[in-house]
């Protein structure tokens, strides 16, 4: 997990159904001016990374500016084939636990 100030300067992970990753990628490119690519496995495995549910992850760099994080999350989640988006603006948690190489940080509202 990452804590960022500007979501447009970082890639956003989008979980998609395996059979729909090409159409989701095309939709995001055409409608959100996004650069989107499927996340590929590195060592020991060939092909795309799969989630515990067997879905693929697309890394998306959004080109279209002017949308709030909530608007962007809503718009991407409405695309057929999208399972989840790595933006958490609609359902804000009361507590977030972030782990990194330098330690653990707990954020509360």
Image: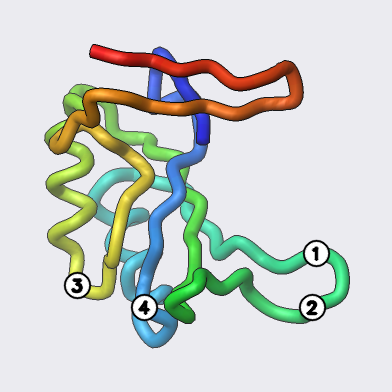
Where residue 25 sits, quadrant-wise, is bottom left
Q: Is 96 on the left or on the right of 39, as rendered?
A: left
Instruction: Tell me the residue that label 1 is attached to.
Output: 42
- 102 and 26: which is toward the camera: 102
List the residue tagged with mark 2: 45
Q: How many marks?
A: 4
Q: Of helix, strand and loop, which one carries label 3?
A: loop
Mark 4 or mark 3, whichever is nearer to me: 4
Q: Position of residue 67 (x, y in %)?
A: 18, 28
Circle 2: is it few (<14), some (14-19), or many (20+) Cα within 10 Å? few
Q: Is residue 31 above or below residue 51?
A: above
Answer with the quarter of the image where residue 44 lies: bottom right
Up-down: is 54 above or below 15? below
> Which mark sits nearer the N-terminus, 3 or 2?
2
Circle 3 Cα neighbour tier, 10 Å, few/some/many (<14 / 14–19 / ≥20)? some
- Residue 17 is labelled as 4
Q: Which-is-in-front pick, marks 3 and 2?
A: 2
- Is 58 left or right of 49, judged from the image as shown? left
Task: Please identify the quadrant where the C terminus is shown.
Answer: top left
Measure how far apart labels 1 and 4 are at the Cα level: 20 Å
| Cα distance between the residues tagged 4 and 3 | 9 Å
Task: Report the disc number at residue 78.
Answer: none
Sequence-wise first label, 4 or 3: 4
Q: Secondary structure at mark 1?
A: loop
Residue marked by disc 3: 80
Q: Are marks 2 and 1 in contact (CB under 8 Å)?
A: yes
């Amino acid at each position: 997990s990452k804590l960022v100030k500007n979501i447009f300067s970082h890639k956003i992970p989008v979980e998609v159904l395996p059979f729909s990753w090409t159409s989701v990628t095309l939709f995001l490119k055409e409608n959100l001016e996004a650069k989107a690519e499927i996340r590929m496995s590195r060592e020991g495995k060939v092909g795309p990374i799969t989630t515990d549910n067997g879905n693929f992850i697309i890394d998306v760099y959004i080109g279209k500016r002017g949308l709030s994080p909530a608007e962007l999350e809503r718009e991407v989640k409405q695309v057929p084939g999208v399972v989840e988006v790595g933006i958490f603006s609609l359902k804000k948690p009361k507590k977030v636990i972030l782990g990194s190489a330098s330690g653990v940080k707990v954020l509360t509202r």
